[in-house]
Structures are given as C-alpha cells and as structure tokens.
Image (tube, rainbow, N blue to C red):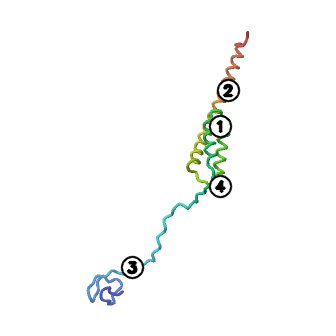
Amino acid sequence: MYCKNCGAQLPDNATFCTECGAAQQPQQAQQPQQPQQPQYQQPYTPVVTGLNDTPILVTGILAVVLSELGIVGLILAIVNKKKVKEFLAQGGQLAGKAKVGKILGTVGLILSIFMIVYLVIMIGIAIAGIAGAASSGAFNY
C-alpha cells in the first residue's frame, strides 16, 4: 500500500504514513459493484381498440332486471359470463362498460339463483298445503 499524500510505501495495515504522518485508511478488498436492479413495472399491455363492450353491459343489466323471473335471469347471467370471456380472449380490458357489465352479470347470477331457490321453496310449501288440505277433507262438498 502507498501513502495517498506522499506516495511512500507503507505496510498494508498502516493507519498513518511513517514519512509524512498523513492518516491512511487500510485498503479493503473491493468487491465488484453489481449494477442496481431495475424496478419492476407492470408489463405493458397494449389497449386493443375496436372491441365492442356494449353486449357485456346489456346482458349484465338484463340479467339483473330479469333475475326476478329466475331461469331467464340465470340464462342471461351465463351469457354475460360468456361475453366477458370472449372479450378478454380478444385482448379487451375490463374497464368502463365492460367492468360494470361483468359486475351486473355477477349480481344477476346471484339474484337469479336466490330467486330459483325461493320459487322452489314456495312451490314445495304450496304443494304441501294442497296435499294437507286434501287429506283433511277440506275439498269434500
């Protein structure tokens, strides 16, 4: 090691120069610096234009509105899910009308299932009531 001030040769672990008295820092084995890793970003996804997201919105709205009819709302909700899958397969992004349509389709699906279950229960109660009334002789004139 050499003095940084006067250039005199020094032992490797010297803290001061024996010639000029300048403070020295012992040399440390320099490790090669690795380049800083770049920050990871979301991969660029090009926005595909020209895709029609209106059918997703329309089927979503109809699925919610017609969910009171049970099976009709269920069919429209399933059509909505198919439209969303096709839209995404073509490179579309769920934003705006497409996102709202998907949410409405999901709500329509849930409401339709609840309505179908409700109708099955009500029909079961009605059948049990009619059968009970018939067995008690309520229909005898």
Q: Which residue is mark 1?
A: 73
Measured in 3D between alpha carbons, the distance from the residue under mark 4 to the one under mark 1, in whole angstroms, is 26 Å
Give the SS element for disc 2.
helix
Q: Position of residue 4 (x, y in %)?
A: 32, 85
Give the SS element for disc 4.
loop
For badge 2, the amino acid type reads Ile
- Looking at the image, tell me whether mark 4 or mark 2 is earlier in sequence order: 4
Measured in 3D between alpha carbons, the distance from the residue under mark 4 to the one under mark 3, in whole angstroms, is 58 Å
Q: Evaluate whether residue 96 shows in this view.
A: yes
Q: Position of residue 69 (x, y in %)?
A: 65, 33
Measured in 3D between alpha carbons, the distance from the residue under mark 1 to the one under mark 3, in whole angstroms, is 75 Å
Res 4 label = none
Q: Position of residue 10 (x, y in %)?
A: 33, 88
Q: Position of residue 136 (x, y in %)?
A: 70, 14
Res 123 label = 2
The answer to whether the residue labelled 4 contacts the one labelled 3, judged by CB atoms less than 8 Å apart, is no
Question: Which of these two is toward me, 119 or 140?
Answer: 119
